[in-house]
Structures are given as C-alpha cells and as structure tokens.
Image (tube, grey):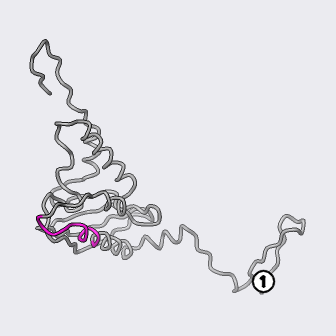
C-alpha cells in the first residue's frame, strides 16, 4: 500500500511514498563507502593491483616498463602529482643525482618474478587503510602500503619498504623541499665549485 503526499500545499505536485513494510532500504554513499572499508575488500584490491604489476614487468633481462600506467590505474592523485613534481625537478636540475634510482613498485632496480604473500589490511577509517605484505622480487621484502579510498576505489597513497626503512612519499617531499645546489660566486675564469 502506498500513501499519496502533497508537496507545498498547492495540490499541484504529488509524490508516491511507500508505507509500512513496502519502503525500500535506503543506501547512502556513506554506507556503500563503509562497506568498501572491509579488510577483505582492501586485501583483494591489493592482490588485483599486484597481479597487474606482475603482468606489467616482462621477463628478466628485458627493459622494465614505465610506472606511469600502473600509477594512473592504482595510485592516488596526490601520489601521481608528487611523482610528476619530482620528475620535473630532476629534469630541470641536470647533472644532479636523480631521485628515482629504484622502482617503488618492485622495491629495487632489478627484478625477477613478481608476487606477493601475507597480505593483511588494517582499516583506519572509511577512507584510509594500511596494508602489509611480503613482496617477492629476487628476495622477500616487507612492504607497507598506505591506501586511500578515492573516486570509488582503493588507491595506493604511499609505498614503505619496511625491510630497508624507506618511506617513499616522505622522501619525495624531502627531495622537493631540498634546494638545488647553487654555484659559489667565483672571480674571473675560476672553476665553479658547488656546496
């Protein structure tokens, strides 16, 4: 049975309102997001991400892939912006040591068959979670992923190599804050020395 409701008291606009047990359940975006914040869903998402990583890296001794497509598909907007800023800074400062001398997806320069195990999610709130895992790439590497819920999906917002205590996001921020080396003032034709 449904009740007829009149809006505005003028009788021109009517709305059909279900009454009693006929009312459908109301699902809000917040409820859906909360449902997405279960450890099982996050762990499954990380497994899907690293299946894509394993597929993206070719056989040993081939040229490694660009991380751009993996970043776009699986990393947060903030992560992608930081990577772009670091790459821009490094390209402007030719001759200085580049930041990315290793690959955060595989926690190294060299790689073999990529896989993960012992995936465990710890939900912080509806929008944040930490995931610990073992990355298998020529050795076993303890990794922590800081995840955020963005645009309806869990995305990686930071990579932390717990085996070597390397926090990639923190180190990128420090790299960006570091001023580029400026030449000392010199007189005449002397060789310019850097600090």
Up-down relation of residue 96 to residue 30 (above or below): above
| Residue drawn where x is 19% and y is 70% of the image | 114
**Residue 13 falls in image quadrant:** bottom right
Magenta residues span: 51-61
Quadrant the C terminus occupies: top left
- How far across and down, in percent of the image, does residue 32 sit? 51, 72
- How far across and down, in percent of the image, does residue 155 sit? 37, 63
Image position of 82 (left or right of 23): left
Q: Nearer the viewer, residue 182 or 148?
A: 182
Up-down relation of residue 63 to residue 176 (above or below): below
Quadrant the N terminus occupies: bottom right
Inspect the magenta stretch and tell me whether residue 55 lies in it.
yes
Up-down relation of residue 158 to residue 1 (above or below): above
Disc 1 target residue: 2
Q: Residue furthest right?
A: 10
Image position of 158 (left or right of 107): right
Image position of 114 (left or right of 52): left
Inspect the magenta stretch and tell me whether residue 150 lies in it.
no
- How far across and down, in percent of the image, does residue 172 sit? 27, 47
| Residue drawn where x is 83% and y is 72% of the image | 14
């Amino acid at each position: 049975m449904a009740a007829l409701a009149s809006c505005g008291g003028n009788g021109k606009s009517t709305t059909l309102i279900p009454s009693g047990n006929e009312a459908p359940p109301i699902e809000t975006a917040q409820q859906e997001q909360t449902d997405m914040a279960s450890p099982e869903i996050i762990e499954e998402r990380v497994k899907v991400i690293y299946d894509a990583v394993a597929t993206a890296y070719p056989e040993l001794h081939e040229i490694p892939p660009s991380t751009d497509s993996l970043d776009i598909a699986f990393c947060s907007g903030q992560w992608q912006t930081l990577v772009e800023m670091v790459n821009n800074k490094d390209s402007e400062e030719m001759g200085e040591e580049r930041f990315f001398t290793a690959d955060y997806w595989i926690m190294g320069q060299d790689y073999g068959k990529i896989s993960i195990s012992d995936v465990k999610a710890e939900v912080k709130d509806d929008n944040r979670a930490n995931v610990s895992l073992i990355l298998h790439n020529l050795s076993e590497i303890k990794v922590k992923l800081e995840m955020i819920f963005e645009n309806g999906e869990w995305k990686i917002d930071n990579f932390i190599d717990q085996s070597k205590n390397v926090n990639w996001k923190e180190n990128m921020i420090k790299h960006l804050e570091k001023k580029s080396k400026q030449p000392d003032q010199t007189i005449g034709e002397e060789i310019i020395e850097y600090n």
